[in-house]
Structure formats: structure tokens, C-alpha cells
Amino acid sequence: MKTKKYLFLILIVVLSFSILLPIYENFENENNIEIVVARYNEDLEWLKEEPFNKFPVIIYNKGENDDFFKPPLLKQIVNLPNVGVCDHTYLYHIITNYVRLSNISVFLPGSCYDNHKKGRCIDVLNKTIETNNTVIYSNYDENNKTNLYNFSLTDWISTNNKNKEINKDTKLRNCDINPYGKWFEKVFPNISNDYVTYMGIFSVSKQHIHNRSKESYEYLIEFVNKNKNEECAHYIERSYVAIFHPLPNECIYN
């Protein structure tokens, strides 16, 4: 009888754990900031610095090696095919984690400590900590629809020296729909093109990610999942305000 009683108690504990764990995970995710890094050949030493070293990190590695700093709060390393640069990585993370996203995801390229990006990435994380909300820097211009309509690229190379060491190919695969204005009208038919984003450095809340369905992110990733150098990645880079539309004005910074 005692054995049966012990087995019954063990069963109760196991069942309780299986019921409470998802509740606990949801509660935890409602109250955290998570850094998502898109890495190619960068050393990621900047993850040792404050404020980055205070937060859990997921690293998506598209490089040919794993020779990079692994922070103490590292949650996961995910190896991905080298396609679509950081914009493919961000979409992949959103799609894969759509129902279990952290309250705030801070999306950073491995090259975010390059001289022309460093100030932006520090500012984004600090403002995210301060506001516990989405932080996107954007250039606003009511004439963007006209100014950027014919934007197109045929060649591009990374500005990061370590990335250029292993990828000197500059040729881009043409976007399935181009130029940029035509693509934007097709993908975001009822959204204005007043806000343009650059650098792939921003944070976004789970709530604002959920402004769009998982299926719509799956549609977007199809534009950047075929080649390491995708023209459409540069279209997506410019369109994050539209992607997470509608965003409150207080989440958009100049």
C-alpha cells in the first residue's frame, strides 16, 4: 500500500509540474528582455560590455566557425544557413518563437559595435531598459514614398572587416519584386512609407510583433531565404516600422 501511495504522490507532483511550468515560463517571459544576435564572422566581444552582459542572449550563427565569445547568460546558439543576412535571422527568430517570445526582443547584428553602429545599439538597449517597450530609430519623411520608390541594389558588401574576410562576393540576388516602392506597395498595401529604418538595430515587444500574424512573417522570409546576398534584405531593413505596424509614436525615435 505504501508503494502505491508513493507512486500516487509522485504522479501528482509530475502532473503539477507539467501544468505549472508553462504558466511559470509565460510569467517569466512577460517580464524579461532578451538579446537576439545575428552573427556571421564577428567575435562578439562586445557582449562582455555593459549593459549587454546583463541580459540573456540567443546567438544565431551563420558563419563558418564558432570562434566567438559565449556570454555567461547565453541561452542558445542556433546554426543557420548563410542566407538573407540579419533580416532573415530576425524573421526566423520571430517565426520559430512566435508563441513564446520574450516580452522584449533586442535585435542586433554581430557587427553592432562597428564605429558607425555602436552608439545606436547602446542607445537602443538603454532606452529599452528605461521604457520596457519597443525602440526603433527611424528617418521620417512624408516624401519617402516618392524618394525611395526606385531604390534598388545590384551590388553590396559588408562594412565589417571580419565579415569581408570570408565573404567578398558583392553580387545581390534581385528581389522577386522590385524596385523597393513596388515591393512595399505589394507587401504593405495599406501602410504609409513615411518611416525608414537602417542598420538592423532595434527592440520590439511581443505585443507589437503580434500586430502581425505568424503567417505574414513566413511570407516575408520567403523574400530573403535563397541567397547569402539578397537585395530584398535591404528592402526589409528599411521597413521595420511598417512590419510591426501600428506602433505608438513614443516607440519611434529620430
Image: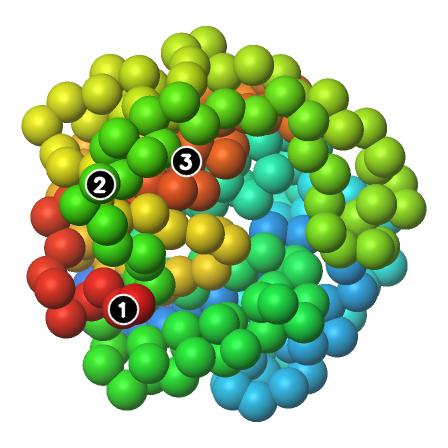
147 relative to 188 in the view: left or right: right
Mark 2: few/some/many CA within 10 Å (<14, 14-19, 20+) = few
Location of the N terminus (image quadrant):
bottom left
SS state under label 1: strand
Between 144 and 71, the one nearer to me in the picture: 144
Q: Quote the CA–CA distance across marks 2 and 1.
A: 18 Å
Instruction: Give the mark nearer the N terminus: 2 vs 1.
Output: 2
SS state under label 3: helix
Q: Which residue is mark 1?
A: 253
User: In the figure, 57 relative to 60: above or below?
Assistant: below
**Amino acid at the residue labelled 1:** Tyr
Q: Which residue is mark 3?
A: 236
Mark linked to residue 143: 2
Discs 2, 1 touching: Cβ within 8 Å: no
**Amino acid at the residue labelled 3:** Ile
Q: Which residue does the image show at 33% across and 19% down from the upper left? A: 183
Between 191 and 32, the one nearer to me in the picture: 191
Location of the C terminus (image quadrant):
bottom left
- Residue 154 image point, x, y percent: 63, 21
**Amino acid at the residue labelled 2:** Asn
Q: Quote the CA–CA distance across marks 3 and 1.
A: 18 Å
